[in-house]
Protein backbone atom coordinates (compact mmCIF):
# COMPACT_ATOMS: atom_id res chain seq x y z
CA UNK A 1 0.00 0.00 0.00
CA UNK A 2 1.29 3.46 -0.88
CA UNK A 3 4.16 2.04 -2.97
CA UNK A 4 4.44 3.87 -6.29
CA UNK A 5 7.90 2.57 -7.22
CA UNK A 6 8.21 0.86 -10.62
CA UNK A 7 9.62 -2.44 -9.38
CA UNK A 8 11.29 -4.77 -11.92
CA UNK A 9 8.70 -7.50 -11.23
CA UNK A 10 5.98 -5.15 -12.52
CA UNK A 11 7.48 -5.32 -16.02
CA UNK A 12 4.79 -6.93 -18.16
CA UNK A 13 4.11 -8.41 -21.58
CA UNK A 14 1.61 -6.92 -24.02
CA UNK A 15 -1.65 -8.90 -24.13
CA UNK A 16 -1.30 -9.66 -27.84
CA UNK A 17 1.95 -11.50 -27.14
CA UNK A 18 0.47 -13.80 -24.51
CA UNK A 19 -0.53 -17.42 -24.88
CA UNK A 20 -3.78 -18.03 -23.01
CA UNK A 21 -4.77 -21.52 -21.90
CA UNK A 22 -8.42 -22.25 -21.23
CA UNK A 23 -9.44 -25.42 -19.41
CA UNK A 24 -13.02 -26.12 -20.39
CA UNK A 25 -14.13 -24.49 -23.65
CA UNK A 26 -17.85 -24.54 -22.94
CA UNK A 27 -20.10 -21.48 -23.11
CA UNK A 28 -18.09 -19.39 -20.61
CA UNK A 29 -14.72 -20.64 -21.85
CA UNK A 30 -15.62 -19.74 -25.44
CA UNK A 31 -16.82 -16.28 -24.38
CA UNK A 32 -13.44 -15.69 -22.71
CA UNK A 33 -11.54 -17.14 -25.68
CA UNK A 34 -13.35 -14.76 -28.04
CA UNK A 35 -12.16 -11.77 -25.98
CA UNK A 36 -8.54 -12.93 -25.92
CA UNK A 37 -8.65 -13.75 -29.63
CA UNK A 38 -10.05 -10.27 -30.29
CA UNK A 39 -6.98 -8.59 -28.82
CA UNK A 40 -4.57 -10.81 -30.72
CA UNK A 41 -3.50 -13.31 -28.06
CA UNK A 42 -2.79 -16.93 -28.93
CA UNK A 43 -5.55 -19.01 -27.35
CA UNK A 44 -5.15 -22.69 -26.48
CA UNK A 45 -7.88 -24.82 -24.98
CA UNK A 46 -8.44 -28.26 -23.57
CA UNK A 47 -11.96 -29.62 -23.92
CA UNK A 48 -13.01 -33.29 -24.16
CA UNK A 49 -15.97 -32.35 -26.39
CA UNK A 50 -14.86 -29.40 -28.57
CA UNK A 51 -17.62 -27.40 -30.26
CA UNK A 52 -17.52 -25.87 -33.73
CA UNK A 53 -18.00 -22.45 -32.14
CA UNK A 54 -14.92 -22.90 -29.93
CA UNK A 55 -12.81 -23.93 -32.94
CA UNK A 56 -13.22 -20.39 -34.32
CA UNK A 57 -11.24 -18.91 -31.42
CA UNK A 58 -8.95 -21.58 -29.96
CA UNK A 59 -6.41 -24.21 -30.88
CA UNK A 60 -7.24 -27.44 -29.04
CA UNK A 61 -4.29 -29.11 -27.37
CA UNK A 62 -3.64 -31.73 -24.70
CA UNK A 63 -3.79 -30.82 -21.01
CA UNK A 64 -0.01 -31.11 -20.70
CA UNK A 65 0.66 -28.89 -23.72
CA UNK A 66 -1.79 -26.26 -22.48
CA UNK A 67 -0.23 -25.86 -19.03
CA UNK A 68 3.32 -26.01 -20.38
CA UNK A 69 2.86 -23.32 -23.06
CA UNK A 70 0.39 -20.87 -21.49
CA UNK A 71 1.28 -17.54 -19.90
CA UNK A 72 -2.19 -17.35 -18.33
CA UNK A 73 -4.29 -20.39 -17.47
CA UNK A 74 -8.00 -19.76 -17.03
CA UNK A 75 -9.72 -22.57 -15.18
CA UNK A 76 -13.20 -23.80 -15.94
CA UNK A 77 -12.33 -27.35 -14.78
CA UNK A 78 -9.35 -29.02 -13.06
CA UNK A 79 -5.73 -27.88 -13.51
CA UNK A 80 -2.15 -28.88 -12.75
CA UNK A 81 0.07 -26.28 -11.08
CA UNK A 82 3.39 -28.07 -11.25
CA UNK A 83 3.20 -28.44 -15.02
CA UNK A 84 2.63 -24.72 -15.63
CA UNK A 85 5.34 -22.33 -16.79
CA UNK A 86 6.99 -20.46 -13.90
CA UNK A 87 6.06 -17.16 -15.58
CA UNK A 88 2.37 -18.14 -15.93
CA UNK A 89 -0.63 -16.85 -13.97
CA UNK A 90 -3.55 -18.99 -12.88
CA UNK A 91 -7.01 -17.40 -13.16
CA UNK A 92 -10.08 -19.00 -11.57
CA UNK A 93 -13.52 -17.60 -12.36
CA UNK A 94 -15.32 -20.93 -12.06
CA UNK A 95 -15.63 -22.03 -8.41
CA UNK A 96 -13.33 -21.55 -5.43
CA UNK A 97 -13.60 -25.23 -4.57
CA UNK A 98 -11.85 -26.15 -7.84
CA UNK A 99 -8.67 -24.62 -6.47
CA UNK A 100 -6.41 -26.12 -3.82
CA UNK A 101 -5.75 -22.87 -1.97
CA UNK A 102 -2.66 -24.08 -0.11
CA UNK A 103 -1.19 -25.56 -3.30
CA UNK A 104 -1.59 -22.19 -5.03
CA UNK A 105 0.09 -20.32 -2.17
CA UNK A 106 2.94 -22.84 -2.10
CA UNK A 107 3.34 -22.65 -5.90
CA UNK A 108 3.56 -18.83 -5.81
CA UNK A 109 6.01 -18.76 -2.89
CA UNK A 110 8.24 -21.43 -4.43
CA UNK A 111 8.19 -19.69 -7.82
CA UNK A 112 6.38 -22.52 -9.63
CA UNK A 113 3.84 -20.00 -10.96
CA UNK A 114 3.97 -16.20 -11.20
CA UNK A 115 0.62 -15.40 -9.61
CA UNK A 116 -3.07 -16.02 -9.17
CA UNK A 117 -6.27 -14.13 -9.93
CA UNK A 118 -9.56 -15.26 -8.51
CA UNK A 119 -13.13 -14.02 -8.71
CA UNK A 120 -14.28 -16.97 -6.61
CA UNK A 121 -13.36 -18.02 -3.08
CA UNK A 122 -13.69 -21.25 -1.15
CA UNK A 123 -16.79 -21.09 1.09
CA UNK A 124 -17.45 -17.59 -0.20
CA UNK A 125 -20.86 -17.23 1.44
CA UNK A 126 -18.97 -16.13 4.57
CA UNK A 127 -17.07 -13.42 2.66
CA UNK A 128 -18.97 -12.07 -0.36
CA UNK A 129 -21.04 -9.01 0.49
CA UNK A 130 -19.19 -8.33 3.75
CA UNK A 131 -16.63 -5.67 4.55
CA UNK A 132 -13.68 -6.37 6.84
CA UNK A 133 -11.95 -3.42 8.45
CA UNK A 134 -8.45 -4.79 7.96
CA UNK A 135 -6.65 -7.68 6.32
CA UNK A 136 -6.55 -10.59 8.72
CA UNK A 137 -10.15 -10.30 9.93
CA UNK A 138 -11.49 -12.62 7.25
CA UNK A 139 -12.95 -15.74 8.90
CA UNK A 140 -11.21 -18.31 6.69
CA UNK A 141 -7.47 -18.77 7.37
CA UNK A 142 -7.02 -20.33 3.92
CA UNK A 143 -8.32 -17.13 2.29
CA UNK A 144 -6.01 -14.99 4.44
CA UNK A 145 -3.13 -17.22 3.40
CA UNK A 146 -4.07 -16.92 -0.27
CA UNK A 147 -4.25 -13.11 -0.08
CA UNK A 148 -0.89 -12.81 1.66
CA UNK A 149 1.35 -12.92 -1.48
CA UNK A 150 -0.23 -9.66 -2.79
CA UNK A 151 0.43 -8.19 -5.40
CA UNK A 152 1.03 -11.63 -6.93
CA UNK A 153 -2.53 -12.52 -5.92
CA UNK A 154 -5.58 -10.45 -6.84
CA UNK A 155 -9.02 -11.40 -5.55
CA UNK A 156 -12.46 -10.00 -6.39
CA UNK A 157 -15.80 -10.81 -4.67
CA UNK A 158 -17.45 -13.03 -7.32
CA UNK A 159 -18.35 -10.03 -9.46
CA UNK A 160 -17.55 -11.54 -12.88
CA UNK A 161 -21.23 -11.54 -13.81
CA UNK A 162 -22.15 -8.38 -11.88
CA UNK A 163 -23.43 -6.39 -14.84
CA UNK A 164 -26.88 -5.12 -15.70
CA UNK A 165 -27.26 -7.33 -18.82
CA UNK A 166 -26.13 -10.43 -16.91
CA UNK A 167 -28.61 -9.81 -14.09
CA UNK A 168 -31.40 -9.16 -16.61
CA UNK A 169 -30.53 -12.42 -18.38
CA UNK A 170 -30.54 -14.36 -15.09
CA UNK A 171 -34.01 -13.07 -14.27
CA UNK A 172 -35.50 -13.59 -17.75
CA UNK A 173 -33.96 -17.06 -18.20
CA UNK A 174 -35.12 -18.12 -14.73
CA UNK A 175 -38.64 -16.89 -15.55
CA UNK A 176 -38.65 -18.73 -18.91
CA UNK A 177 -37.45 -21.95 -17.24
CA UNK A 178 -40.11 -21.62 -14.55
CA UNK A 179 -42.85 -21.16 -17.18
CA UNK A 180 -41.63 -24.20 -19.16
CA UNK A 181 -41.63 -26.36 -16.02
CA UNK A 182 -45.08 -25.07 -15.07
CA UNK A 183 -46.43 -25.86 -18.52
CA UNK A 184 -44.96 -29.39 -18.43
CA UNK A 185 -46.42 -29.95 -14.96
CA UNK A 186 -49.90 -28.93 -16.17
CA UNK A 187 -49.68 -31.21 -19.22
CA UNK A 188 -48.45 -34.13 -17.09
CA UNK A 189 -51.25 -33.52 -14.59
CA UNK A 190 -53.91 -33.71 -17.33
CA UNK A 191 -52.32 -36.75 -18.97
CA UNK A 192 -51.90 -38.63 -15.69
CA UNK A 193 -55.47 -37.88 -14.65
CA UNK A 194 -56.85 -38.68 -18.13
CA UNK A 195 -58.69 -35.40 -18.34
CA UNK A 196 -59.74 -34.52 -21.86
CA UNK A 197 -58.98 -31.04 -23.18
Image: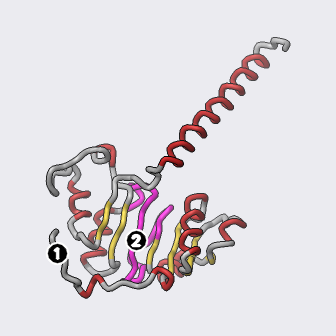
For this orientation, the residue located farthest to the bottom is: 8
In this rendered view, identify the residue nearer to me: 81 or 9: 9
* Residue 143: image tag: none
Residue at image point 56% right, 77% down: 43
Residue, disc 1: 3
Is 88 magenta? The answer is yes
Q: In which quarter of the image is residue 151?
A: bottom left
The first of marks 2 and 1 along the sequence is 1
Question: Is label 2 in a helix, a strand or a loop?
Answer: strand
| Marks 2 & 1, CB-CB < 8 Å contact | no
The x, y position of residue 47, in whole percent, is: 60, 67
The residue tagged 2 is: 90
Q: Quadrant of the C terminus?
A: top right
Q: In the visual, does 2 lie left or right of 80?
A: left
Q: In this view, does 43 lie to the left or right of 159?
A: right
Alpha carbons under labels 2 and 1: distance apart = 24 Å
Residue name at image x 39 percent, y 55 percent: 97
What is the count of numbered marks? Answer: 2
Residue 119 forms part of the magenta stretch: no
Per the rendered image, the range of residues in magenta is: 74-99
Neighbourhood count class around disc 2 (C-alpha, 10 Å): few under 14, some 14–19, many 20 upward = many
- Residue in the picture at 64% in, 35% down: 176
Which residue corresponds to the image point at 31% horizontal and 75% vertical from the top-left? 107
> In the figure, is residue 190 to the left or right of 107?
right
Relative to 163, residue 175 above or below: above
Q: Where is residue 166 in the image (x, y as percent from the top left)?
A: 52, 48
Q: What element carries label 1?
A: loop
* Residue 46 sits in quarter: bottom right
Amino acid sequence: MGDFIMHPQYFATEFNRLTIGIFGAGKIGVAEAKLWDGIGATVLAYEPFPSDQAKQYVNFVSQDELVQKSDVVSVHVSYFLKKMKTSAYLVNIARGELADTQAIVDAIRSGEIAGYGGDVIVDEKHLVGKKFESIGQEPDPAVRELMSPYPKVLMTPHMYSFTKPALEDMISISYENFMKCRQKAIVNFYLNNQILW
